Amino acid sequence: MRLAREPMFDRIEPLLPKVEKPTRYIDGEWGAIHDEESEFRVCLIYPDTYEIGLSNMGLAILYSAINSAEGMACERSYLPWVDMADLMRESEVPLLALESSCPVASFDVVGFTLAHEMACTNILEALDLSRIPVRASDRAEDDPIVLGGGPSVWNCEPMAPAFDAVLLGDGEEGIVDMCRCVKDGRSQGLSRSQILENLACVQGVYVPSLYDIVVGEGTTPWGVAVAREGSNAPAKVVKRVIPDLSATDPLPSGIVPFMHTVFDRQAIEVLRGCARGCRFCQAGITYRPVRERPQDQVVAACCKGLDRSGYDEVSLTSLSTTDHSECAQILHRLNASVAGKGVRVSIPSQRLDSFGVDMALEVAGDKRGGLTFAPEAGTQRLRDVINKNVTEGDLERAARNAFENGWRRMKLYFMMGLPTETDEDIVAIPAAAQRVLEIARDVIPKGQRGGVSVSISVAVFVPKAHTPFQWCGQLPIDEVRRRQRLLVESTHDRAIRVSYHDAETSLLEAFLSKGGRAVFDVIEDAWRSGCRFDAWSDHFRYDIWDAAATRHGYDIPAIASQGTPVGTRLPWEHTSPGVDPGFLEREWRRALDGITTQDCTRTSCVGCGVCPTLGVSNVIAGDRS
Amino acid sequence: MSGFMLRVGYGKTGRLRYLGHLEVLGSIDRIVRRAGLPFAVSQGFSPHMRIAFSPALPVGALSECEWFDLMLTSLVPVEEALGALVDASPRELAPTRAAYVDPRSPALGAWLDRVDWEIRLVGGGLTVDCVRAALDDVVSSGHVDYLRSGKPRTVDLRRTLVSCDVRGTGPDVLLGFKTRSSNDGALRPDVLAGAILGDSRLEGASCELMDVRKIGQWHEGEDGLISPLDLAVTTSA
Ligand code: SF4
């Protein structure tokens, strides 16, 4: 039932002295938009705490896109931390939107960012706190229309029953089209199901309730989603794409939080997409093609953004900022323009080569924190399998360059459980760290070696939909644990610190990445049994998940480690990021043969199919080769 | 490095009373940057704005008498600087007055050693008389024992409490008190309120809401109280 639109801050206020970090709930930030005029209202929810959600670029982009659209107002909400959520239930206060303090369930549209698989119980928690039924099929005529979108929609079946509609791909135009469709439908007095039919006609929109799950020959036990006959739903939903990033506002929302957030700075998206072609990487497929923002636009946006926000740091964000063809020029110009203002320029990740170090040098100022590189695999053989096109030589040159330039701490990211991996590849991880350490000892004079440290962080590979590794099973958990021990045992130097991801978290991630619509029963059960904030290690309860899955007849470890024969119809094949399935298959075979594939922004098209399918092409501002 | 020290009075009101001290400092840093004032930056590894603040206000406490000293590299007329700051501030954290002071003035933190507080108590069965009795009981003991971050602490009321009184307005009880801080310590409003409300001193009454408000802060000079703006100087470029 739609709740009445009335401000309820007076109901939240008495709870504030009782909770951690009350600033999460108070609104009033600089740059927040308060629009009391518009008739049509959207609330975007980030399914995690305020300080994580506020930094989310995608949500900021959608917030300003909707607020700029005629006749629509957009507010935000975040999931209250457990202390506040419990108090709100106890005091019978529903989840509120931040700007107006009105109930989320009083809005016309409620949109969620599917940030990652581990946020699924948080979405249910947010819906329930809002008093919106967690299943779309249980919603009443006048309940808000619940939308989903974001990075984790690429196998959205496990969460599909929670959504009235899901947007695939770039959101800035798609979300406005969806809202307009709902707005028009409401003003024409259409029924909820008619509105959903209309939403299915908006390009890039998947309406789960219009698809039946069919299990049959050639499918996995999860089946495939088939558009219902007589409905408007397309057989395959192809993602939305913005052909030219320069046509979008480089400075979307200007909300400046009071509290410390995870990325507490002005962020400017300098490019979208990455075509390096790492075969495990979902974003590398789903954000294609590569679209760079021109340097003048980036520099102007940074300066304007800093003036407007008052931040003392500006960050150039993207999947691979140092790949921007004008990265060096942008950093030079920015550094010159912020000189003397106590402002830092930062880039989120470094490319594993000397250029990466040069760029890190460009932004480091007098400070030398840690430097981070991601070789991902220990041996050249395995790096060829995953198409991580860096060599031992690249790592060694980058390390030497970094230590010579004053860095003392280096962090190396690897993955474990990659296809074809053997013990040799595991042992090679600490060996690579050891070589880096020896370079440090070689380069750095004896008296200054005190602060030298090399750390390795090893994640467990999770096979993701729409990647060349989508058919793989995850390494069985016992084997993960054995290899984790092997990793630690083969690390001999005490100056090398080893950390690895929790195997059970990765296991659940694999289960959620592989499963179909029926998995929602497990998610709902786990949430009803108390799971929330699964991405917070101290709140993650694998035992509850395992019990929930067992109750529904699923064996999480068995499902996670189950491979699928190539050619099988996959649970996500009705959604498409534009990539040609034949390309993924070809990449999988090349992986097994250890043959690498080039980055199409540096050589020529390698035939992934995204550009012809979507009618777009890579947009490179300068020259990348 | 010489410069022009702008002393700015501001409030922390409304919802923004729930900001923590570090959140206030960060927000004011951003306000100054947004205002486009020519602030001075410290030298060193991580250059930062040269700004200093009056003592931390507890989370949840209201005040219209908070202060910061901002070093500027060039002289901006006071009205212009204040206007720019106000335009760049959320209303509930907005500056209200400003003046230039001698850059060699003592740092606000320790110099502001006299603070007046008012606490509004609302609750079932709370009366002026019962609060006054509880207060008298606390004051006559001469000290308050409390826990801070789990550690037992004591504050000496004879050194830190200058005077106090209890008044009533309708259903509310107002507890006013003047404090004096030194290197030996300061009396926090929540500590005094905790002592009054705790230890079952109120016999059956309960406090449901507590509004803490800082009424004023000064430096105690030999000839009486000195307000931060009493040190204003006239400056010319
Ligand atoms: S279609 Fe070709 S150019 Fe376009 S992203 Fe794919 S490989 Fe690159």
Image: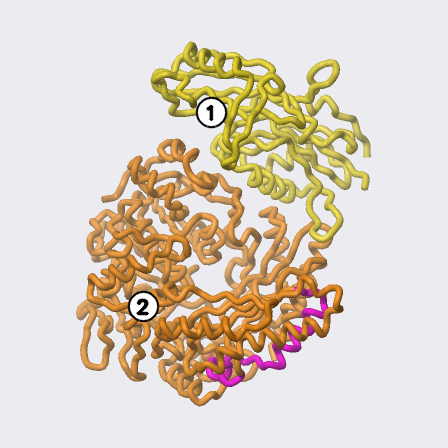
Chain colours: A orange, B yellow
Number of numbered discs visible in the structure rendering:
2
Q: Camera-side residue: A100 or B225?
A: B225
Residue to which mark 2 is pinned: A511
B118 part of magenta stretch: no
| Residue A164 seen in the current view | no
Output the chain of dot 1.
B
Q: Camera-side residue: A528 or B75?
A: A528
Asked which secondary structure carries label 1, the reply is helix
Residue A360 figure quarter:
bottom right
Output the chain of dot 2.
A
Asked which secondary structure carries label 2, the reply is helix
User: Which region shows up in magenta?
Assistant: A380-408
Q: Camera-side residue: A554 or A70?
A: A554
Rendered location of residue A121, percent (x, y)? 32, 55
Horizontal relation, residue A103 to residue B51: left or right: left
Residue to which mark 1 is pinned: B194
Rendered location of residue A206, percent (x, y)? 30, 65
Q: CA distance from mark 2 to mark 1?
A: 51 Å
The structure residue drawn at horizontal position 64% and vertical position 24%, both measured from the top left corner, is: B181
